[in-house]
Amino acid sequence: MKICMIGAGYVGLVSAACFSEFGWTVTCVDNDPSRLDDLAAGKSPIYEPGLDDLLERNIKAKRISFTGDIGPAVRDAEVVFLAVGTPMRRGDGHADLSYVYAATEDLAPHLNGFKVITTKSTVPVGTSREIERRLRALRPDADFAVCSNPEFLREGSAIADFTHPDRILVGCDDPRARAVMERLYKPLALRQAPLLFVDRESAELAKYAANAFLAMKISFINEIADLCEIVGADVQEVATAIGKDRRIGDKFLHPGPGYGGSCFPKDVSALIRTGRDNKAPLSLIEQVERVNSERKLAMTGRIERALGGSVRGKTVAILGVTFKPNTDDMRDAPSLVIVPMLQEKGATVRAYDPQGEKHGKPMLPGIVWCQDAADAAAGADVLVILTEWNEFRALDLARMKATMRGAVIVDLRNALDPAPARASGFTYHGIGRD
Ligand code: NAD
């Protein structure tokens, strides 16, 4: 099967690489020349564990290629995926569909024979129908069907998520398109991945409902963590106890500085706007959004309190700036709120992130970027763990303390075991536990 993937970002590139690994031939189209330059040189423009190897193997086998020229890629393909960004629109919080509709216009002149056009981007309910309407207006002569195939992969474990999904969801109203999508995903269906066919509106809404539910779980445990601190309970134990209940599940019950990333903030916001537009306000989700933004703002207060009330003149060592570990993605990372607030309040910030410096540098001006965690700690008054990269779980704390000015740890991810941290001479502050 020949596939055209429009958009070679976190979702497009991973999906394309995985489809090519199944044996399909994939042409990725992107309009960012620097991305195409990286890919032409055999380099992945994003950091995602396992992706370099997958790309190298499939480039060599000529099953995946990259181009800025959409025409031949669309003309050759049976399935055309739209995997472009749908960021939060400035001003009103709706999903910005301008990239989706620009790509729709770009592909329209090249429709030839029966083609399945399918969104992989997260798009508000009704978008597939609107894409179809626009394509019919541009090309009344063309034979095509528009499907919705939302993607549920997580950055950091994207390849495993794509190749071992909990489900593959396809919104589809056309029997010919359904047959094509069944053939496309057959390699995964053979591995018992459930392939769910629903109508397009349900597929589109399910993606937003899933992300809003997960965001709600995070905000829920964050509020429980705050209560734990006051009443002397331990949030880790509470989370374990409730997570054993299969109705609740143990995932997404880790307290922290508030959710961020490329999906939850924008998708929660877009879902709220969809609810309001349809006179069905989602008051629970509106509250989740409010709780989460207040939480990010409250994190600097924790650091101030840990330093006796003020960060003025203090040096703060930040470990981790990406929105989660195993990615270089900085979109809506909590660090983008917390670090500038610390700087405004008079702190000097030293930071280390295993992958975050490249994108983080222009977004977080005025930081001293360090080579490793020990380097960041040198001369600092406090160590703040903001992203739980594995390498922060086994730090040589005694050695780090020897080079620090202070001896305080604020662990906003509960990444460390408090007892050894205290035994190394630190005052340790976690979230929702002593
Ligand atoms: P991204 O910004 O990493 O990638 C988008 C790519 O599309 C970029 O490389 C950009 O240059 C390219 N592009 C934009 N307009 C184009 C056009 N007209 N023609 C060709 N290329 C074009 O975005 P992403 O994180 O991969 O997200 C893509 C979509 O997938 C979004 O809707 C997102 O919500 C959804 N999604 C993302 C994730 C995730 O973890 N990142 C998970 C599930 C779903």
Image (spheres, grey):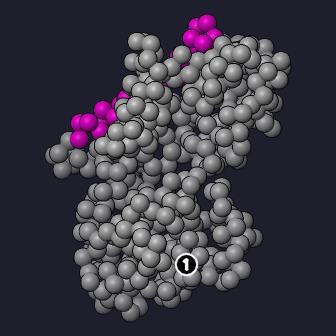
Query: Is 268 above or below relative to 408?
Result: below
Report the residue that reaches farthest toward the top.
308
At 42% from the left and 74% from the top, the residue drawn is: 189
Q: Is residue 248 left or right of residue 305?
A: left
Report the residue that reaches farthest toward the bottom.
113
Residue 303: say if magenta.
yes
Q: Magenta span: helix, strand or loop, mainly?
A: helix
Quarter placement of the C terminus: top right
Q: Is mark 1 within 8 Å of ligand 1?
A: no
The residue singled out by tag 1 in the image is 22
At 59% from the left and 18% from the top, the residue drawn is: 429
Measuring from the top left, give residue 425's x and y in whole percent. 73, 13
Give the residues drawn in magenta, as a range.
282-310
Q: Is residue 147 left or right of residue 328?
A: left
**Residue 116 shows up from this direction:** no
Measuring from the top left, give residue 301's x and y in whole percent. 53, 16
At 50% from the left and 60% from the top, the residue drawn is: 161
**Residue 434 shows up from this direction:** yes
